[in-house]
Image: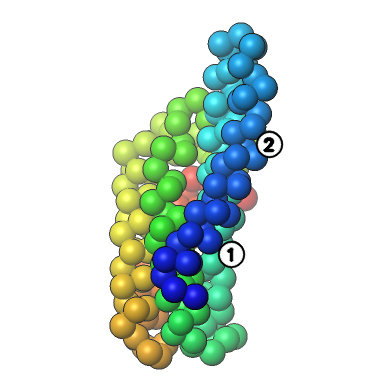
């Protein structure tokens, strides 16, 4: 699959997720402002959950290579790394203050909103590490040290943010 086809596939998947998530706000147009704000918060949560699910599903084969559970297939790793890099950029804006609803609606801790500067810093690092992984994967034909370092940086970014800002 070409890079363009891979991106188009990712966009179709994300577009479908956004369409499903956004359909609730179309039906809420006649509700009071409070309900509309609540719908916007729920939509933000739905979009970020869908995006994180796609990121997790695309990073899984990379993680399996890191763990020695799968062989390194450069074409597959490049495809997955490019998707993770693309999807990571879509997270910007999916944590508006009004989406601080707590459980069960979201597992995002209130600290992600009260310590926004640190949270945003970690998110930007995740995006940068994801882009770096995509670049490294494109040049590495084996599970080299450079690949492992780049992939571990992405995985470490996930863990670091989850440890601080996600309910268990």
9 to 138, vertically: above or below: above
Specify whether 127 is left or right of 41. left
Circle nearer the N terminus (2, 1): 1
Q: Depth check: give the residue in front, 159 or 35.
A: 35
State the SS at label 2: loop
The percent coordinates of residue 19 (x first, y second) are 60, 40
Whether pointer 2 and pointer 1 mark residues with C-beta atoms closer than 8 Å, the reply is no
Residue 154 appearing in the image: no
The percent coordinates of residue 26 (x first, y second) are 62, 24
Front of the two marks 2 and 1: 1
Q: CA distance from mark 2 to mark 1?
A: 22 Å
As drawn, the label of residue 4 is: none
Please name the residue shown 44% across and 46% down the image: 91
Query: Which residue carries the number 1 mark?
Result: 57
Q: Residues within 10 Å of mark 1 (few under 14, many from 20)?
A: few
Colour pattern = rainbow
State the SS at label 1: helix
The percent coordinates of residue 36 (x first, y second) are 58, 18
Q: Depth check: give the residue in front, 164 or 123.
A: 123
Query: Which residue carries the number 2 mark?
Result: 104
Please name the residue shown 44% across and 84% down the image: 74
* Res. 154 image quadrant: bottom left
Residue 42 appearing in the image: yes
* Res. 157 image quadrant: bottom left
Please name the residue shown 49% across and 86% down the image: 73
Q: Depth check: give the residue in front, 159 or 53.
A: 53
């Amino acid at each position: 699959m070409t890079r363009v086809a891979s991106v188009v596939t990712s966009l179709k998947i994300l577009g479908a997720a956004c369409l499903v998530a956004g359909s609730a706000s179309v039906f809420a147009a006649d509700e009071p402002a409070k309900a509309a704000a609540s719908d916007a918060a729920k939509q933000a949560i739905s979009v970020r959950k869908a995006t994180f699910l796609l990121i997790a599903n695309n990073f899984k084969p990379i993680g399996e290579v890191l763990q020695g559970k799968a062989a390194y297939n450069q074409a597959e790793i490049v495809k997955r790394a490019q998707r993770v890099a693309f999807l990571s950029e879509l997270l910007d804006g999916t944590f508006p203050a009004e989406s601080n609803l707590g459980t069960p609606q979201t597992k995002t801790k209130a600290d992600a909103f009260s310590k926004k500067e640190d949270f945003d810093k970690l998110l930007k690092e995740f995006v940068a590490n994801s882009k770096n992984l995509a670049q490294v994967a494109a040049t590495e034909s084996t599970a080299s040290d450079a690949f492992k370092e780049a992939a571990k940086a992405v995985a470490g970014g996930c863990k670091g943010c989850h440890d601080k800002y996600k309910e268990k």
